[in-house]
Amino acid sequence: MMDKKDLKIALCICPQWSISTPSFALGSLNTALKEAGFNPTQYDINMMSSLYLKNNHKEYFKKWTQDDPWSTKGVFWEQIVPLFQEFWFDIVKELSEFDAVSFTTYSSNIMTTDYLARYLRQLNPNIHIWYGGPFCWYGENGGLSELGSNQSTNESLIKGKYREFVDVGCGTNEGEKTIVDLATDLIETGSYDNTNGIWKWDKLRPSFATVLEQGRSGRKPVYTGNLQIMNLDTLSTPTWSEEVLKGYTEIRKEDKTSDFGPKLTVPIQGSRGCTFKCTFCSETRLYRYRSPEKLIEDITKLNKEYGVENFWFTDSLINGSISNYKKFVDVLNELIDKGELPKIRYGGYFRTHKKMNEKFLDEARKSGLVYMNIGVENGVPKTLALMEKNQTPDVIKMYLDAVTKDDKIVFDAGWIPGYPRETTIDFISSLKFLFDTKHNFKYDVEKTGRINLMKGTDVLVDTPLDTEREVFDISKDESLLKNWISNDYRNNIFNRNLRSHLTDLFLNIFKINKRGMIKDGDVSMAQSWALDTSFYNFQSDGNKSNVSDDIIFKNSFLTPSSGESTFKEILINSLIDEVKGFAWLIYSLQKNVNLEFGMTDNFKVFNLKDTSFIININFETKPNSDFNLKVDFKINVDKEDRKYLNIKNVNELELDETFEISGNFDKDYSDNKVVKDIYLDSLNIDKYKINIARTATTGRY
């Protein structure tokens, strides 16, 4: 039998992934294998590819952190592959000499991983290829199927193909134990019969360097049963090779996007899973945590061994357990005060919570907290309830004020427009919340909050939005361009993308800071989405003094459209309603408005052929409340994309419409009970509060 040290194992992570820190997975898997007697080699292809750009194509280096090109087929094959092909092939040739190659997969790097793994199989038909990581956690058959958690469930209804070139897909179990079992089984049996908690094939060979429909190869995927969850305190501190750390040290000097500055930052982990169960989330899984003592032991070791003072928490939530996080902060401050640990800097993901007040955050700042990614998502009671955030707008405002108390913490606040059951008035209310909290997102302050704007809401596989569609008024049978649609058709992909662009425009108009913002004097460029373009010109005479909600949400101009009989009519009116609502809100907040806005959305991130959505808005108001509003919009669904028009009696979709309206807001539109009732309904958090049973991906223990 082969000696453990003679088994050649490569641990790989492919681009695109963060260049802010080394991969925690590579570090933790490396430690686990070494403690078990193996001698793995780390191949951080993500880091290597970044340095390749820096040294050979520096003009592309600044674009590295944009996720979209790496998950968009057309862009990946037309732009990414030609740039890296020769460089990557040299790496794959090296990897082909190994016995087993493990890949850590994410939705953002699965295309690159597949591309390299298939070539690896071509070069060495007998090599063992293992997939693990978040893509496999929620992917069908542990990632052996092409369908993964990053895809909307409407798209997943399309029959998938199987990654014949992958031998093992690892699910939600602990990777450190799984990879040791895989390596041990490979030496002892040459198969994976004794490894639990994985997806494998009923026949190990032949393994083809391609994807095939199930049954075409004569093999089928099988699950080997559950693996007992580990106590995280039994895991040792992650370790990285000198080459990996040297590479990220060099990258840190060049990357200006990090909130930790130019010094090396390493990942650390205090917990896995999540204590909460947001209805949109596919990341939530079994929650378990590392004790504060063990976590500080990790920090101390990494500081002494590598001289690192910057740490990034990979946790889904650092404050998933408030008591645990508070204990960590207290012990950390005690050690720093005693001089037993140098002052460190750390950051990670947080949720809003009433217990994290000014006093709590003062202690957290003292312990080294410098960055927070906060799951705010929305500011409307109804929408927060449907998300199961278990938060109120008042708690969120308190939390944001506590974080921005002294402008010493940089933070990103996640924001999701277009949630299921969101009405136009709900959407306008969410923008009003952003207006009311704009002092927390200061455009001209270096260390402040930023809105991290999402582009609509995806319905991901096995999330509550998917399994409980009737609760969220999501159609079970129909879809539009690989995306979910509401039963009444009003919440659709065009409508949601428009809300995202209008939110972005709103942030620009009111100089509300956002992630990815480019500042040039007083000019704020639009947030970058894949192949989207937009422009705006805005002038006004400043803010109005009285902008209370009861004034904004009483006007009959916001009355929803009605009386449609066809899908096209509903689609047109859903877009007009959004623009009218947005225009009314701007009028309510600003004096004498002149606005021009245009955008082109190509939906390339959904891997469509050639579908486009173009909209242009002209809006002007005068001192006497006279206004003019003109909206031009065009929709063209390419012939090849029409197969994704899964709507009854809709075989093609092409619109070229102009909507114009003028009048006087004060004279023509009086108080309206319909609008007031819809607005009051959006405040009724008890009416929309839900408690959906946990699914496979949202288990809470």
Image (cartoon, grey):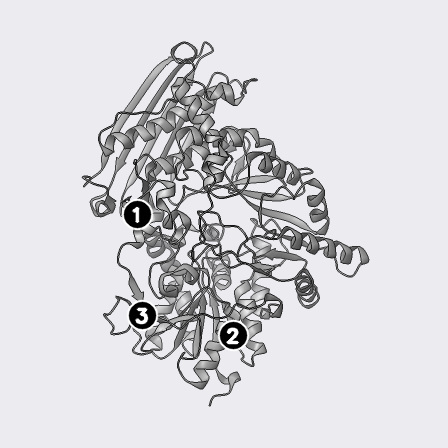
Q: Which mark lies nearer to you, 3 or 2?
A: 3
Foreground residue, 62 or 664? 664
Lateral position of residue 641 relative to residue 79, left or right: left
Label 1 near label 2: C-beta < 8 Å? Answer: no
Instruction: Identify the element where label 2 is drawn.
Output: strand
| Distance in Å between CA atoms under marks 3 and 2 | 25 Å
Residue contact between numbered discs 3 and 1, judged by CB atoms under 8 Å:
no
Q: Vertical placement of 545 versus 126: above or below?
A: above
Q: Which residue is mark 3?
A: 164
Residue 37 in the image: above or below residue 492: below
Q: Position of residue 443 (x, y in %)?
A: 58, 34
Q: Which mark is residue 309?
A: none
268 in relation to 526, above or below = below
Which is more N-terminal, label 1 or label 2? 2
Q: Quadrant of residue 619?
A: top left
Q: Amino acid at mark 2?
A: Thr
Instruction: Please provide percent x and percent y for residue 588.
Output: 48, 20
Q: At numbered mark 3, what does the secondary structure look like: helix, strand or loop?
A: loop
How many numbered dots are placed on residues in this image?
3
Q: Position of residue 355 (x, y in %)?
A: 65, 43
Q: Which comes sooner in the sequence, label 3 or label 1?
A: 3
User: Does residue 152 appear left or right of residue 262 in this picture?
Assistant: left
